[in-house]
Amino acid sequence: MQPRSSFVVSFSALLGGALLFAATLGLTGCDFQFGWGYNGGYSPEQPIAFDHSLHVTQNKIQCQYCHNQVERSPHSNIPALSTCMNCHMAVKTDSPQIQKLREAYDAGQSIPWVRVHMLPDHVKFNHSAHLAKGVNCQTCHGPIETMQRVAQHADLSMGWCVNCHRKPENNAPTNCSTCHN
């Protein structure tokens, strides 16, 4: 058995090493977070500026019009250019952003949108199941209808999801296989 003073020195060295490691991550700009979720506040620049507040709040377009697979599929979809062009063949055609859409559409290409809301690979999330239970988009995505540039509202961590599932009014499963592959 080690003398007590030896244990204190070992523990202090271990604690000091852990703090030095954490400080090094912070100084290098590393995004690693100690279990507090993923990408909270993440708001990447997109190849074409898309203003949800204009489309949803001002023009009253429902989320499901553009994200038309969300009610039928486990995954939400990034809208096809044909969906955009349903309106933009005639609406705001002189806009440089819409002209980029039109060029890609005419060339049979897609827009390389940058994914905003991400979960780890070992997590499965079913959009259609949540919509079927009456969960609205804003519960997870925040006030998307006011966002000129989409930002990840919630951290989407396991704890955040489990806390919602545990609410008695949600009557949601909490077993591991619900969300983990």
Image (cartoon, grey):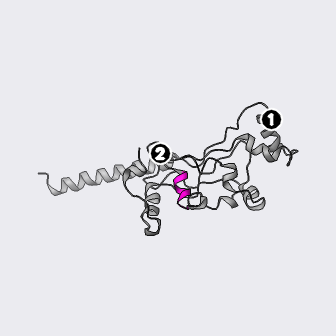
> If you read the primary sequence from the N terminus, does the residue marked by circle 2 or circle 1 appear first?
1
Does the magenta segment cover residue 128? yes
Q: Tell me which residue sits at (38%, 53%) in the image.
A: 19
- The three-letter amino acid code for the residue at tag 1 is Glu
Question: Which disc, if any, is residue 181?
Answer: none
Image quadrant where residue 131 sits: bottom right
- Pointers 2 and 1 in contact (C-beta within 8 Å): no
Magenta span contains residue 150? no
Q: Report the front residue among 147 and 134.
A: 134
Disc 1 is placed on an element classified as helix
Pointer 1 local density, CA inside 10 Å: few below 14, some 14–19, many at least 20: few
Q: Give the left or right position of residue 58, taking residue 5 as reference.
A: right
Q: From mark 2 to mark 1, how far is it between C-alphas?
A: 34 Å
Residue 24 % position (x, y): 45, 47
Q: Of residues 87 and 6, which is closer to you in this image?
A: 87
* Start-end of magenta stretch: 127-134
Specify the farthest residue to the right: 94
Q: Which mark is residue 120?
A: 2
**Camera-side residue of 68 and 161:** 68
Tell me the quarter of the image containing the C terminus: top left
Which residue, given by chain and number where applicable, does mark 1 sit on? 103
Residue beneath the point at 50% across and 51% down: 38
Q: Residues within 10 Å of mark 2 (few under 14, many from 20)?
A: few
- The amino acid pointed to by label 2 is Pro
Q: Main secondary structure of the magenta part?
A: helix
